[in-house]
Image (cartoon, rainbow, N blue to C red):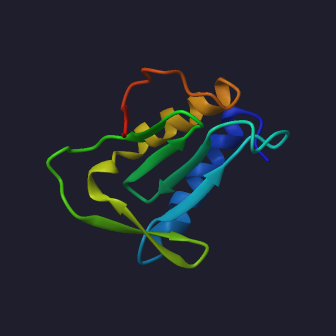
């Protein structure tokens, strides 16, 4: 359980370091502990030098947007299982940090129009 930005930063650093020793980056799920089903679900890929965020709400789906011309899929590791994500979701780690930081700062609701997130239809 994380409650502060410092705890979040230390957690991201730890996952990133552990991902560096694996064949593919790690995928985490993030939720609000008091009401995990009452807020958008967040999946975040955290690698040593790349990552992505996917936010699934009741009425929207937003993802990080890397190079829109990138095609194909990338493999992330979720609890020992291969998870494929579109390659154009991948962004630098500082963007992943900023989105997860906003999730924490805003009580589980990343503001609409947040930079580096796009709606998926």
Instruction: Give x and y (percent) for residue 30.
Output: 65, 48
- In-front residue for pair 9/71: 71
Left or right placement of residue 33 versus residue 94 in this view: right
- In-front residue for pair 24/89: 89
Residue 119 sits in quarter: top left
What residue occupies the far left of the structure in this picture? 69
Q: Which residue is found at the position 48% from the left and 56% from the top? A: 45
Instruction: Give x and y (percent) for residue 117.
Output: 39, 33
Task: Tell me: residue 32, above or below residue 73.
Answer: above
Instruction: Give x and y (percent) for residue 62.
Output: 44, 38
Residue 39 sits in quarter: top right
Q: Which residue is found at the position 14% from the left and 48% from the top? A: 69
Task: Tell me: residue 93, above or below residue 87.
Answer: above
Q: Quadrant of the C terminus?
A: top left
Task: Tell me: residue 9, above or below residue 118.
Answer: below
Left or right placement of residue 108 versus residue 93 in this view: right
Q: Which residue is found at the position 71% from the left and 27% from the top? A: 107
């Amino acid at each position: 359980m994380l409650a502060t930005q410092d705890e979040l930063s230390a957690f991201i650093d730890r996952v990133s370091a552990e991902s560096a020793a694996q064949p593919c980056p790690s995928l985490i799920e993030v939720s609000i502990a008091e009401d995990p089903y009452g807020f958008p679900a967040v999946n975040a890929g955290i690698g040593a030098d790349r990552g992505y965020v996917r936010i699934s709400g009741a009425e929207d789906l937003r993802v990080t947007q890397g190079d829109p011309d990138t095609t194909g899929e990338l493999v992330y590791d979720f609890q020992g299982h291969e998870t494929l994500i579109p390659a154009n979701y991948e962004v630098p780690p500082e963007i992943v940090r900023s989105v997860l930081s906003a999730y924490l700062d805003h009580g589980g609701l990343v503001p609409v129009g947040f930079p580096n997130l796009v709606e998926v239809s």
